[in-house]
Amino acid sequence: METLIATKPRLAFAGVGWIGRARMKAVADSNLAEMSLIADPSEACLQEAFKIAPATKITGSFDELLSDKEIDGVVIATPSALHMQQAVAAFKENKAVFCQKPLGRNRVEVSAVVNTARRNNRLLGADFSYRYTNAFQKILSIIRSGELGKIFAVDLKFHNAYGPDKPWFYDFSLSGGGCALDLGIHLVDLMLYALDFPKTIKINSSLMAKGISVKGKKEVEDYAAVTMDLEDDITAQLACSWNLPAGSDAIIEAGFYGTKGAVALKNVAGSFYDFVALRYWGTKTETIVASPDDWGGKALLRWIKQLSTNNHFNREAEQYLQSAEVLDKIYGRMD
């Protein structure tokens, strides 16, 4: 029997730094849900969030958020070390969860989140927002149509010229990893999603910090180079970095190459937000989707629409386990 929510879902937001506030703004603009409560230990963040939703109750306590029986779902945008603990606690209070990536610092933590969601039969969503850009949706439709023939190669890049501005990102015990877990996870998700989640046969990776290998040392990398062999004879390569002198603010690309052509998502002029979809015809390039595109909150809004009709565990949540497994293999945490 479906769990129906008679009115707009009532949401609480745990963590309202810039990403949390951006997601709040998307909800406010959509009018799809009621923002009932905001929790953050930072008074400054609370006050900025209150400007977006002035009728919302604010608190510094996540426990107070959990104890509110009127809350249907929790949107988590706290540091990565808190994601597993907070998501599990929310599910145990029968609340749905939408969480920033990663759901956990490793596959063990992600498994705990997914398994608790399944056990308590509650909806789980993760903010893999690049899936819902217009550019990716267009190349996805072409990939799945079969027009490109057999996909045999994938080329992924995510270089951020700045790197994170929060100290916890650089502490392996808190972050679980560096640029691969922060940036590369988005492109790993796009690859797996586009190819219908093929099994990963073999992964080789180099993880470096300031030009020195840190793989297996529980130190945070600022550069990662990865090769992946997937089932059905598909090869993929991933390069990602923080603070790389790459000549622009960012380089973000996901190219899919088949026996009958290729498609790619690329950012525009170093932008973190503007993307185009390209189709390659031999030596010619066709732009099939142009920017701009207000995509940042689309994953959350999709989750809210699901929550409005059925607050039950969604099998889509199983996909997050495979992404986590790939990341663990990149970090040498799995054979």
Image: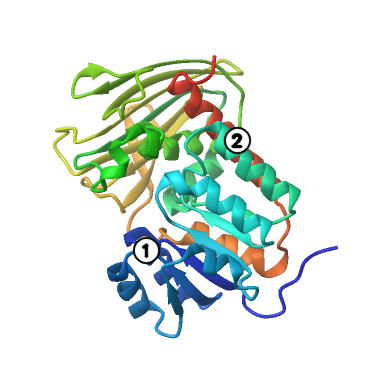
**Extreme residue toward the bottom, this view:** 55
Tag of residue 319: none
Please, is residue 268 above or below residue 185 in the view?
Answer: below
Label 1 Cα crowd, 10 Å radius (few <14 / some 14-19 / many 20+): some
Question: In the figure, residue 95 lies in which quadrant?
Answer: bottom right
Residue 30 in the image, given as x and y percentages of width and height: 49, 74
Residue 96, compared with residue 67, is above or below; it is above
Pointer 1 and pointer 2: residues touching (CB < 8 Å)? no
* Residue name at image x 60 percent, y 73 percent: 68
Location of residue 25 in the rendering, given as x and y in whole percent from the top left corner: 40, 71
Does residue 298 sit above or below 257 in this rendering? below
Which quarter of the figure is the N terminus placed in? bottom right
Q: Classify mark 1: helix, strand or loop.
A: loop
Q: Residue at x 39, y 34 (%)?
A: 173
Task: Give left or right: position of 222 versus 149.
Answer: left
Q: Can you tell which quarter of the image residue 266 is in?
A: top left
Examine the rendering and report whether any part of residue 198 can be seen. Answer: yes
Instruction: Identify the residue position indicated by label 1 in the image.
Output: 41
- 2 on left or right of 13: right
**Is residue 195 something that shows in the picture?**
no
Kindly report which numbered mark, 1 or 2, lies closer to the viewer in this rendering. Answer: 1
Q: What distance separates the C-alpha of mark 1 from that of mark 2?
A: 30 Å
Nearer to the camera, 130 or 84: 84
Q: In the image, is 19 to the left or to the right of 191?
A: left
Quadrant of the drawing holding the C terminus: top right
Residue at 61 percent across and 72 percent down: it is: 71
Label 2 sits on residue? 321
| Pick the front one: 42 or 18 | 42
Amino acid found under the numbered disc labelled 2: Leu
**What kind of residue is marked 1?**
Pro
The answer to whether residue 194 is above or below residue 129 is: above
Q: Residues within 10 Å of mark 2 (few under 14, many from 20)?
A: some
